[in-house]
Amino acid sequence: MRAESRRQEYPATAANARRRKTFGRRAFVVGAAFSIVAGGCAAARAADLSADEVRALLASHSGPAAPDLSKRDLAGLDLSGLDFKGANLTAANLKKANLAGADLSNAIIDLAVLRGANLRGAKLRNAKAYSTIMAEADLTGADLSGAKLICNLENAKLVGANLAAIAGGADMHNQSMGLIRLSLYNADLTNANLAGADLSWALLEFAEFNDTDLKGANLMLTQAGGADFSGADLTGANFTHADIQSARFTGAKGVGSIIGLDSTLHRKTAWFD
C-alpha cells in the first residue's frame, strides 16, 4: 500500500500531535541551532568549482591528507563515477548533483546538502553523514554499509540499497540541542539490506520496507507509524518500545522472533497476518 493511502488510516490523535510537536519529523535531524550552523556554513562557502576542476583536484591529490572539498558549492554538477574516497565534503552543497556510481567510501559529508542528488549505485561504505540533508535523493542500489547516518533521508529512494550494519541510532548522551536522529520518513527501502542496522530512535513513519532484510536490526524506540514491513525478514529484530501504529507486517518473516514486540506502542492497530 502506498504511503498516501496509509496516511489516511493513521489517526492524528491529540497524543500523536503532542508527540509530533516534540519529536516530529522536523526534529529528525537538527534543532534550530544546527539550522543556524548550516546556514552559516552555506554563507561561508568558497567560490564554485566546475566539474572539470573537481576532477582535476581529485586526480592531482596525493599524500596522506584527504581531498578537501568542504564548504564548496558543487550543486548540480555531473560528478558521476568520481573517486571521493576519504574526501572531506563537510558542509558542501551537492544539491541535485549527479554522483551516480561515485565512490564516497569513508568520506565525511557532515552538514552537507545532497537534496535530490543522484547517488544511484554510489559507494558510501563507512561514510560519515551527521546532520546531512539527503532528502529526496536517489540511492537506488547504493552501498552504504557501515556508514554513520544521523541524517535526513526523507522521501529518499533506497530500493535495493545495502545499509547493512549502518550506525543510525541517536546518541542519547549528546542531545543538548534537541533530538538529532536519522529520518527515513516516507523513504522507499524496498528490497534493501538493513541486516544488523542500528535504527534506534529513528523516524520511520510511512517508510516502505517491503521485502527488506532487517534481520537482527535495532528498531528500539523508533517511530514507525504507517510504515510497511510487508514481506520483510524481521528475524531477531528489536522493536522494544517502538511505535508501530497502523504499520503493516503482512507476510513478514520471523515475526515470532521479534524482540520486544509486546512492548510496542499501538500494536493493536498494526496489521499482521
Image (cartoon, rainbow, N blue to C red):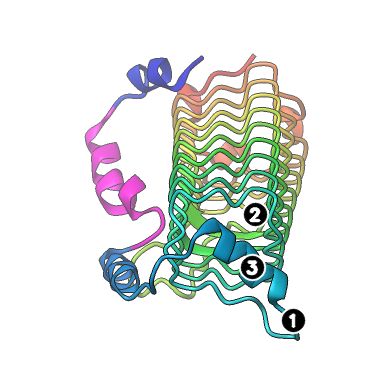
Residue 35 locus on image (x, y percent): 29, 65
Which of the two discs, 3 and 2, labels the residue nearer the N terminus? 3
Task: Identify residue type, mark 2.
Answer: Asp
Work out how far the residue at label 3 is from the one at label 1, CA to CA, in angstroms.
Answer: 12 Å
Q: Mark on residue 117? A: none
Residue placed at 30% from the left, 38% from the top? 16
Residue numbers of the magenta segment: 12-30
Nearest to viewer (mark 3 / mark 2)? 3
Residue placed at 67% from the left, 64% from the top? 84
Q: Mark on residue 198? A: 2
Q: Determine whether, in the image, residue 237 is placed left or right of residue 204.
A: right
Residue placed at 74% from the left, 48% from the top? 164
Residue placed at 59% from the left, 51% from the top? 199
Residue 48 falls in which quadrant of the image? bottom left
Residue 81 or residue 243, whichever sits in front? 81
Q: Is residue 206 magenta?
A: no
Residue beneath label 1, please? 62
Callouts 1 and 2 close, C-beta under 8 Å: no
